[in-house]
Amino acid sequence: MTLLTRLTRLLKADLHGLLEDLEEPVEVVKQAMRDMQEDISRQEAAHAALAATLLRLQREAQALAGILQDLERQIDLCFTAGNEALARNLLRKRLETTRRAQRVATAQDDVRTQHEELAAKITAHKAQLAAIAQQLQTSLDTQPHGSPTHEAWGSHSPITDDEIEIAFLEEQRRRSKPAEPRS
């Protein structure tokens, strides 16, 4: 069993190594850059959603502040008129509204923090992506066109029939010459 496990691991390692050799390094980097761009796009969408949530919470906080002002005015009116029963109901509503306003304020703080942190992450990821793109471009600019990266995978034009014919004739001429005597 142990021998079989080791042999399986060895074959998997060889297969993975072969696949890594077949992959074009530039294409792997380009794919990683596309993946990073997709991640940035998702983060930007989440950032926009957080901004919308923050705006909704701000509007809700403003509405609650307006309700609290109306309740204060109504409570003052009830105490002035001597209507304690109605004043108690309005005090309960004021307490409920105040608690709700506190929850909204807490949610605003949380969402604002998340919004700022995500903005910082997006900025950092964009900087990383730009740095990788610049390094890739520098690498491509300094890499000779005769390098294995370009030649091994058919970056050049295909061989034409005329080139094959010329090579055939040259080989035929070379083979038809009598061998020179060696001294």
Image (cartoon, grey):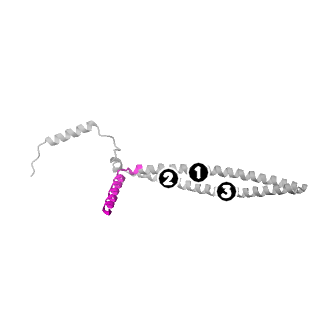
Residue neighbourhood size for the residue with mark 3, other residues' Cα within 10 Å, grouped as few (<14), some (14–19), many (≥20):
some
**Rendered location of residue 101, percent (x, y):** 73, 56
Residue at coordinates 82% horizontally, 55% vertically from top-left?
A: 89
Mark pair 1, 2: CA separation: 19 Å
Mark number displayed over residue 107: 3
Question: Where is 164 relative to 102, above or below?
Answer: above
Mark 2 lies on a secondary structure that is helix
The residue at which mark 2 appears reads as 129
Residue neighbourhood size for the residue with mark 1, other residues' Cα within 10 Å, grouped as few (<14), some (14–19), many (≥20):
some
First reached walking from the N terminus: tag 1 or tag 3: 1
**Rendered location of residue 114, percent (x, y):** 61, 56
Q: Is residue 84 magenta?
A: no
Q: Is residue 2 magenta?
A: yes
Amino acid identity at mark 3: Ala
Task: Look at the image and give the residue range highlighted in magenta.
Answer: 1-27
Mark pair 1, 3: CA separation: 16 Å
Mark 3 lies on a secondary structure that is helix
Q: With 25 as the anchor, is 171 left or right in this view?
A: left
Which is more toward the observer, 173 or 115? 115
Mark 1 lies on a secondary structure that is helix
Q: Nearer the viewer, mark 1 or mark 2?
A: 1
Amino acid identity at mark 1: Ala
The residue at which mark 1 appears reads as 46
Q: Taken as a whole, is the magenta stretch helix, strand or loop?
A: helix
**Marks 3 and 2: CB-CB under 8 Å?**
no
Specify the quadrant of the image occupied by residue 167: top left
Q: Is residue 168 visible?
A: yes
Q: Is residue 137 visible?
A: no
Q: Nearer the viewer, mark 3 or mark 2?
A: 3
Q: Nearer the viewer, mark 1 or mark 3?
A: 3
